[in-house]
């Protein structure tokens, strides 16, 4: 009788709680849940059957910044999964991110997927389909993300959500204001993997000891690149949307656009006094997805995928004012 009474009191207390608290208790999607929904999305995508997904009635879907009906675009042409996959989970915000490879018409292709989850249903689907075969093949050869992406940060050393965004945003601002005189919060071991290639730091940190000392070694470190002023041709980094922040693993993930205005912006004076001409001769934009691993206030591994898009293009998830702003969100 006491057990039954205890259970009844527990149920009564839950029913008496505010509705939003009851909803959070019953519908919270933890890390395993978020990863499982990414699995379900990939399975449904390869089967070309969006009806397999638990979606909200007003689900919103974009592909490369264009709003489409769920089931359109890549859903017509995908032919399989690829071996490379980096998962990022933001349990507090209900956001799941995948940076990985797939097959489209049999060709290795990069896919970035963001799912916005509420009540264990998919309400938002944002995708980048980067049709760069050589970059996808390079990721497939790497095979798996660095261990650091999967390693939890000790409880006492975890940054707040705001601090993770603030530190990661210093990377974007360091490029946009690239005079070589900023504060660049990098670990000495920072290495950037960009479209499957190591573009800063030691490739051995990404590809393993066999890459050490080879011609594949990036010429400079992350900090040295920023201190050189070499990114001056990037005139604006806008629509900085930090859509997934994983405090447990110290990861901040963002979508952004790197504008290259061309013209006079191509004429660069590096910090050492050398004058160079760099960047495209016409205005254009990189659409980018980038993840930052942050530990003890410093950026370590960086991983990004990107492709060229029309100059000034928007994401489909921001107002025009937000899309033109360099303010992080």
Image (spheres, rainbow, N blue to C red):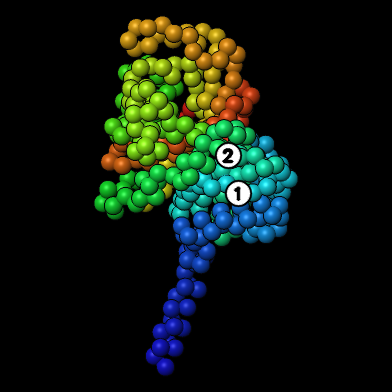
Q: Is residue 117 left or right of residue 242?
A: right
Q: Position of residue 249 (x, y in %)?
A: 37, 49
* Foreground of the two, 52 or 80: 80
Residue at the spot x=43%, y=19% of the render? 231
- Examine the rendered structure and indicate whether residue 95 appears above or below residue 9: above
For disc 1, the marked residue is: 81
Q: Secondary structure at mark 2?
A: strand
52 versus 60 height, above or below:
below
Q: The N terminus is located in which quarter? A: bottom left
Secondary structure, mark 1, is: strand
Residue 130, horizontal then vertical, whole percent = 60, 35
- Does the rendering let one see residue 38? yes
Binning the other alpha carbons within 10 Å of mark 2 as few (below 14), some (14 to 19) or many (20 upward) gives many
Horizontal side, residue 40 vs residue 25: left or right: right
Q: How many marks?
A: 2
Residue at image mark 2 = 110
Residue 38: where, in percent of width, then height?
A: 56, 53
**Residue at 35% over, 50% down:** 151
Residue 55 can be seen, yes or no? no
Q: Can you give x and y, in whole percent of width and height, for residue 221 in the image?
A: 34, 26
Estimate how packed mark 1 is, as few (under 14), some (14 to 19) or many (20 or more) residues with alpha carbons within 10 Å.
Answer: many
Where residue 97 is drawn, which disc sits there? none
Question: Which label's residue is closer to the chain start, 2 or 1?
Answer: 1
Q: CA distance from mark 2 to mark 1?
A: 10 Å
Q: Nearer the viewer, residue 288 or 12?
A: 288
Residue located 41% across and 84% down the image: 6
The residue lying at 70 percent from left, 42 percent from top is 105
């Amino acid at each position: 009788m006491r057990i039954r009474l205890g259970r009844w009191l527990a149920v009564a207390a839950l029913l008496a709680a505010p509705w939003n608290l009851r909803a959070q208790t019953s519908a919270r999607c933890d890390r395993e849940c978020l990863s499982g929904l990414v699995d379900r999305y990939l399975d449904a995508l390869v089967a070309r059957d969006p009806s397999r997904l638990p979606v909200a009635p007003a689900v919103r879907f974009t592909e490369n910044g264009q709003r489409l009906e769920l089931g359109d675009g890549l859903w017509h042409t995908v032919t399989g999964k690829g071996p490379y996959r980096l998962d990022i989970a933001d349990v507090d915000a209900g956001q799941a991110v995948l940076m990985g490879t797939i097959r489209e018409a049999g060709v290795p292709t990069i896919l970035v997927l963001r799912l916005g989850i509420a009540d264990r249903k998919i309400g938002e689907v944002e995708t980048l389909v980067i049709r760069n075969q050589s970059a996808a093949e390079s990721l497939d050869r790497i095979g798996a993300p660095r261990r650091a992406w999967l390693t939890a940060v000790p409880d006492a050393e975890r940054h707040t959500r705001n601090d993770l965004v603030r530190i990661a945003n210093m990377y974007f601002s360091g490029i946009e204001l690239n005079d070589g005189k900023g504060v660049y919060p990098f670990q000495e071991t920072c290495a950037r993997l960009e479209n499957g290639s190591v573009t800063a730091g030691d490739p051995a940190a990404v590809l393993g000891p066999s890459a050490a000392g080879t011609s594949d070694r990036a010429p400079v470190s992350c900090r040295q690149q920023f201190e050189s002023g070499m990114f001056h041709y990037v005139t604006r980094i806008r629509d900085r949307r930090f859509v997934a922040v994983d405090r447990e693993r110290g990861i901040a993930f963002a979508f952004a656009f790197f504008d290259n205005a061309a013209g006079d912006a191509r004429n660069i004076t590096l910090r050492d006094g050398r004058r160079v001409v760099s960047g495209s001769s016409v205005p254009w934009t990189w659409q980018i997805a980038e993840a930052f691993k942050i530990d003890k206030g410093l950026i370590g591994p960086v991983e990004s995928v990107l492709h060229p898009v029309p100059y000034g293009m928007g994401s489909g998830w921001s107002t025009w004012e937000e899309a033109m702003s360099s303010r992080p969100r």
